[in-house]
Image (spheres, rainbow, N blue to C red):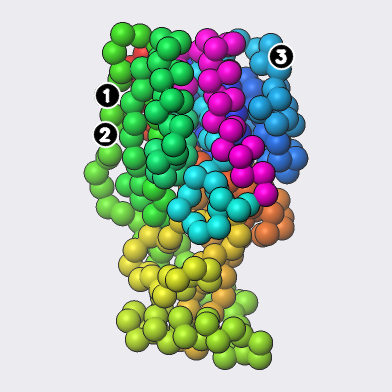
């Protein structure tokens, strides 16, 4: 099956589809870094550095399935999102999916976003626009930790297929959940004292609360109100900024670049920037490949 990956981000959707046997024909994103690294990993695809709202869909090769991970920050529940620059433009990117479907008429469209996307005031209208073109929608809420990945990452997947009936919801596989402890390299050489000069008092308080609850080793959320997380659970959701610190007694450090890659479940040979900051940015904007593979396979198997 031939796939076009819109809002390709870190390339996780394309990687998952590729692992399931799909051919990645095209990819587009407004982020130069995302397009650069997607092209390194999928040189066979035609790439567009493009705002999808301004995309000329006539330029695309024929494809069977569109994957669209529309920007999620303005749909998340985080406070202040409504006051972000380009708030309206970001939310409007969901309509690019409708435009692509109308112009290219693929057999199926998969849209990935945060669960709060369903609370968008225009969400019912957006669904209706796709249905008006003959697509039937199926909504599935999935957590990456249920697909063998050591990360709790809950996302909404809306699968549109042409036909008289919608496909079934995706069945969550069973199995053991991978923990943070299995991923963390406790012998990693670069740790810093918790009580170093300049450490924010709020971080010290989180460390104290986490140590009282979890003991000597645990995860600490660097942003937000997260006071700590057991290493017997998967790592919390990765964002585009490094968020999770590892605590070892009175020492701590952020997740390493290799740990971030493993938390997302990308193959070790997947090409990503040497810079951890840039890698974190791409991974935070990526779909977990294992989840993308499962969603793609489910949709493919119900339309063939």
Disc 3, SS? helix
- Disc with the residue nearer the chain's start (1 vs 3): 3
The Cα–Cα distance between marks 1 and 2, rounded to whole angstroms, is: 9 Å
- Disc with the residue nearer the chain's start (3 vs 2): 3
Residue 34's disc number: none
Residue 50's image quarter?
top right
Disc 3 versus disc 2: nearer the observer? 3
Please give the range of residues in magenta. Answer: 85-109
Is residue 203 inside the magenta stretch?
A: no
Q: Residue at x 60, y 29 (%)?
A: 6
Q: Which residue is mark 2?
A: 171
The Cα–Cα distance between marks 3 and 2, rounded to whole angstroms, is: 36 Å
Residue contact at pointers 1 and 3, CB within 8 angstroms: no
Question: Is disc 3 surrounded by few (<14), some (14 to 19) or many (20+) residues within 10 Å?
Answer: few
Toward the left, the furthest residue is 174
Q: Which residue is mark 1?
A: 168
Q: Which residue is mark 3?
A: 59
């Amino acid at each position: 099956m031939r796939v076009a990956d819109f809002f390709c981000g870190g390339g996780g959707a394309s990687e998952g589809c590729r692992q399931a046997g799909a051919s990645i024909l095209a990819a587009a994103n407004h982020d130069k870094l995302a397009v650069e690294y997607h092209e390194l990993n999928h040189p066979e695809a035609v790439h567009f550095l493009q705002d999808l709202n301004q995309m000329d869909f006539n330029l695309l090769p024929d494809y069977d399935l569109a994957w669209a991970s529309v920007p999620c920050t303005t749909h998340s529940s985080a406070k202040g999102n409504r006051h972000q620059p380009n708030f309206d433009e970001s939310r409007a990117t969901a309509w690019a999916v409708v435009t692509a479907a109308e112009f290219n008429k693929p057999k199926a469209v998969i849209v990935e976003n945060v669960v709060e996307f369903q609370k968008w005031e225009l969400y019912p209208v957006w669904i209706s626009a796709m249905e008006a073109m003959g697509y039937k929608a199926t909504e599935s809420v999935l957590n990456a930790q249920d697909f063998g990945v050591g990360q709790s990452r809950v996302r909404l997947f809306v699968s549109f297929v042409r036909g008289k009936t919608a496909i079934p919801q995706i069945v969550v596989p069973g199995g053991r959940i991978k923990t943070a402890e299995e991923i963390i390299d406790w012998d990693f050489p670069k740790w810093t004292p918790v009580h170093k000069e300049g450490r924010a008092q709020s971080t010290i308080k989180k460390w104290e609360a986490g140590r009282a609850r979890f003991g000597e080793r645990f995860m600490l959320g660097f942003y937000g109100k997260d006071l700590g997380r057991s290493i017997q659970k998967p790592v919390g959701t990765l964002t585009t900024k490094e968020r999770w610190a590892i605590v070892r007694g009175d020492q701590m450090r952020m997740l390493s670049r290799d740990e971030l890659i493993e938390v997302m479940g990308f193959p070790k040979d997947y090409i990503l920037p040497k810079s951890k900051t840039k890698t974190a940015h791409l991974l935070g904007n990526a779909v977990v490949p294992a989840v993308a593979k499962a969603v793609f396979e489910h949709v493919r198997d119900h339309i063939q």
